[in-house]
Image: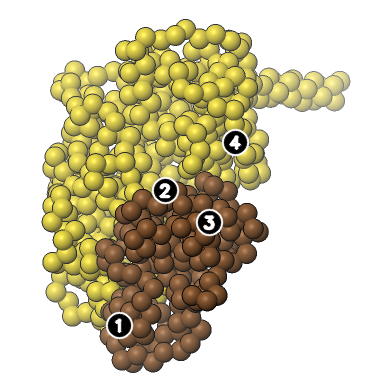
Amino acid sequence: MITLDINGKTHELDIADDMPLLYALRNQVGLNGAKYGCGLGQCGACTVLVNDKPVFSCLTPCGALAGKSVRTVESLGSVDQPGPLQKAFIDEQAAQCGYCIAGMIVRAQALLEANPHPDDETIRRHMAPNLCRCGTHVRIFAAIKSVVAQGGKV
Amino acid sequence: MKRKTIIGAVLAIGVAGLGFAFWMMWRPEIATVSQHLNADRETLDRGRRVVEAGDCAVCHTRPGGAYMAGGLPLVTPFGTLFTTNITPDPQSGIGQWSLDAFERAMREGIARDGHFLYPAFPYVHYRKLSDADIADAYAFLMSVDPIKYTAPENHMVFPMNFRPLVSFWNLLFLHGDPLEPLPNRSAQWNRGRYLVEGAGHCSSCHSPLNLIGGEKGSELFNGGVVDGWTAPALHGMTEAQHPWNEAQLVAYLTGEVAEGHGAAAGPMLPVSLSIAQLPAEDAHAIAQYILDLKKTSSDAPSPPCTSGVKPSATALRGAALFEGACASCHGRAAPMRVIESRPALANTSAVRADSPRNLIQTILQGIPMSSAASSHYMPAFAHNLDDTHVAALAEYLRNESCANRPWTDLDKTIKSIRAQEQQP
């Protein structure tokens, strides 16, 4: 049995230590926001927060998560009440196919929680690990900038 | 009468002492110049190669900063230095330096205005360069974009913040003239020696340093520690249990994956990307010279690695972590393994080394994307795994490849490396 703290709720899961967190989130807990992209830590579609830091959940074994808090895109808002970054991504129409967006929002969330007023270069460098195959980076960047312009409160 | 003699003697010694100190610690300014000749294309190409061979940009360009504008912090046991702006900006860079001033800096470690440069700038090696190479490097540096930027103030501890003291350091360590080729060796070997001992300044990292930061002459190329990474010994690479050949070392030196060994990471990665900019003959020359460095008697032979010991409970836990965090790239059947003959982790020098440093550093920091043709990128695991996980992984991997020589002090090494790193 493994105990995971996900979005503030405790889950007792009958899974092996070596199961990547992404599989547990999607298959056991039913949180499908984080996506399986490459499974190699090269695309960022699976990004979630572990103790407020962005990590690739496809490369994070559940056995390494005792006592840590996991947050996924679902914790940042809902369809009716999207969080500031989610709202900005919608307003800027930053999604094309949408596969990378959960990871993008979560990585941006980590940045703004630590630094509400990042400059452009800091945003670009921070977001670099996450890829968008459709090429909407310019709109993703604009969405993050618009939250920063409103005070960076997430 | 007697008292007068004593006073006179004291005065004389005092004056002589002052004179000596002045002679030791004062260097004249060299006049500024305001114009530079426009060098021709061939000169600039040659100069660019000298500058790449010297890894100038590795230190003189900070992450995200302009080329050669300086500002990279160098953490030394004596405090933190910031590299200087060597673009031709007249005020904040070296735009007013004449070739004479540049050559004096390269050979003697004296800035144009006469102040002593700290030996983190490897003038003890650059002094071995030929006049022509120094002139070409000067021409090239004067041709890069001038950038107005002044690095932050150095934070050196007392008394090292008093630069003239460097003159005493120079007395001990600054010697040797431009290298003359050895007549009984091949042109390629001599070229390799010139690049390794001169511009490349390999021994700056690959030798242990003494208490005052000089390379220990008796232990040249015995390996050292730089930025928390092990710079391995360069002796006897052909005689190692897992020997290197020239093709493998050339691949390693030029930012590619060396078949059966792995690829450059940490502070060696930018160096390899610099060497990759040189003509291929230069990388071959460096490899030939390094592979000719024989084991010395002072190198304590480590017994060969053996595997097959029953894993401990910690190692078994490491094996589970490996499956979840590493196996998708490093597992036996991983598709990543078939690219460029990437070696099994058990064969990489990070896992076979006497110290676990480089394995721990690679797990925590990963390997950044690079400009190499096919980058050997690895994500950082500093936030995914905590210290006990990293230790378990290291114990597991070591047990797989070198069970007869387990690493001790894993926990302590991981803690000290974590403390040094400020993860963003």
Q: Dot 2 falls on which chain?
A: B
Tell me: residue A146, above or below residue B323.
above
The crowd level at tag 4 (other Cα within 10 Å; few <14, some 14-19, many 20+) is: some
Tell me: residue A7, above or below residue B215.
below
Q: Label 1, label 3: how many angstroms apart (C-alpha)?
A: 30 Å
Type of residue at label 2? Val
Type of residue at label 1? Asn
Report the mark closest to the observer, 2 or 1. 1
Residue B215: assigned label: none
Labels 4 and 2 in the same subunit: yes
Labels 1 and 4 in the same subunit: no
Q: Label 1, label 4: how many angstroms apart (C-alpha)?
A: 52 Å
The crowd level at tag 1 (other Cα within 10 Å; few <14, some 14-19, many 20+) is: few
Q: Residue at x 18, y 67 (%)?
A: B331
Chain drawn in brown: A
Q: At which x and y percent is residue A4?
A: 41, 85
Type of residue at label 3? Ile
Q: Label 4, label 2: how many angstroms apart (C-alpha)?
A: 22 Å
Tell me which colouring the rendered structure shows. by chain
Does residue B242 appear anywhere in the picture? no
Marks 4 and 3 close (CB-CB < 8 Å): no
Residue A144: assigned label: 3
Q: Answer left or right for B383 relative to A19.
A: right
Colour of chain B in the rendered structure image: yellow
Numbered label tally: 4
Residue B151: assigned label: 4
Report the mark closest to the observer, 2 or 3. 3
Q: Answer left or right for A81 relative to B215.
A: right
Residue B226: assigned label: 2
Residue that badge 1 annotates? A27
Report the mark closest to the observer, 1 or 4. 1
